Image: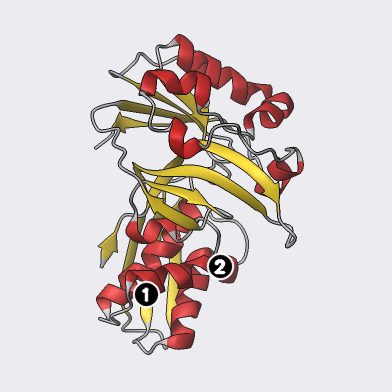
Amino acid sequence: MLTFPNAKINLGLNIIEKRSDGFHNIETVFYPIGLCDVLEIVPSESCTDYSFSSSGIQLAGDPEDNLIVKAFHLLRSGYQFPAIDISLIKQIPFGAGLGGGSSDAAFTLKAINELFELKITPNRLEKIASKLGADCPVFIRNKPVFATGTGNVFTPIDLSLKGYFLLLVKPEIHVGTPEAYSLVTPIKPEIPLLELIKLPLSNWKETVKNDFENSVFARYPMIGEIKNNLYEMGAIYSSMSGSGSSVFGIFETKPERNELFDDCFIAEGYFE
């Protein structure tokens, strides 16, 4: 079975409060985009449990620590299915605020469920995915949602960016999520994001904010420069995604590339 785990962007991200468990309550909108990895899972003819291989962007660390493998082990602990071969072409960059690893894990759960007809409901898959990471569950249904809690409580929203052009830029900078949270002072916004996101897109520049930006831009000025350049190129709205380091711009039509982006990872295309 061949699947295409996609990335997401955050439309707004408010860090509301620090929880007693050390995590943070947030509010954000997760919006799927077309940038994808390629994940293939097939019944194995040569191994007794699983095999895992990857190409494309190099994966760091022990394969057993990869979220794909962790997703496999979670299902294996509760369900019976044959040995599998897993192969990944990694195209979504790491440390970008795009949820690529979480998407890979969620699509692994969905693929195994479908391939072997395990009949696990989406609600149950979301609960399993939540054990892998706060934003893993959003990729089970893979639709735009308003998210609260740690980013794991979803409210469906009626939002479409179809027809707009997305230009996403990631510099050669890795922003660790724990680092980003350590630099932010939580504060409850005066107007909830769920209300702001209903405003016309042309109003978002002044209203829909990412609370990570001020501290991340201060530490990594190049990321802030990218956002400024996207606006200079004509973006209707631009923001850092998640805790960075990728920045996206939403345009009415495809813009001319800026030379500042020559050494950056680029993804672009019209929203579907």
For the point 65% across and 40% down, the residue is 175
Amino acid type of the residue tagged 1 in the rendering: Asp
In the picture of the structure, the residue carrying the numbered disc 2 is: 63
Q: From this viewpoint, is residue 93 visible? A: no
CA–CA distance in space, label 1 to label 2: 14 Å
Examine the rendered structure and indicate whether residue 223 appears above or below residue 174.
Answer: above
Kindly indicate the quadrant of the structure image that contains residue 222.
Answer: top right
Q: What kind of element bears circle 1?
A: strand
Q: Are marks 1 and 2 in contact (CB under 8 Å)?
A: no
Kindly indicate the quadrant of the structure image that contains residue 82.
Answer: bottom left
| Image location of residue 225, percent across then percent down | 59, 18
Q: What kind of element bears circle 2?
A: helix
In this view, which residue lies farthest toward the top?
232
| Image location of residue 180, percent across then percent down | 69, 41
Q: Earlier in the sequence, mark 1 or mark 2?
A: 2
Residue 238 bears which disc, if any?
A: none
Examine the rendered structure and indicate whether residue 257 appears above or below residue 97.
Answer: above
Amino acid type of the residue tagged 2 in the rendering: Pro
| Front residue of 231 and 67 | 231
Left or right relative to 196: residue 158:
left
For the point 31% across and 38% down, the residue is 159
Kindly indicate the quadrant of the structure image that contains residue 158.
Answer: top left
| Image location of residue 5, percent across then percent down | 36, 54
| Front residue of 235 and 4 | 235
In the picture of the structure, the residue carrying the numbered disc 1 is: 85
Examine the rendered structure and indicate whether residue 234 appears above or below residue 62.
Answer: above
| Image location of residue 182, percent across then percent down | 76, 43
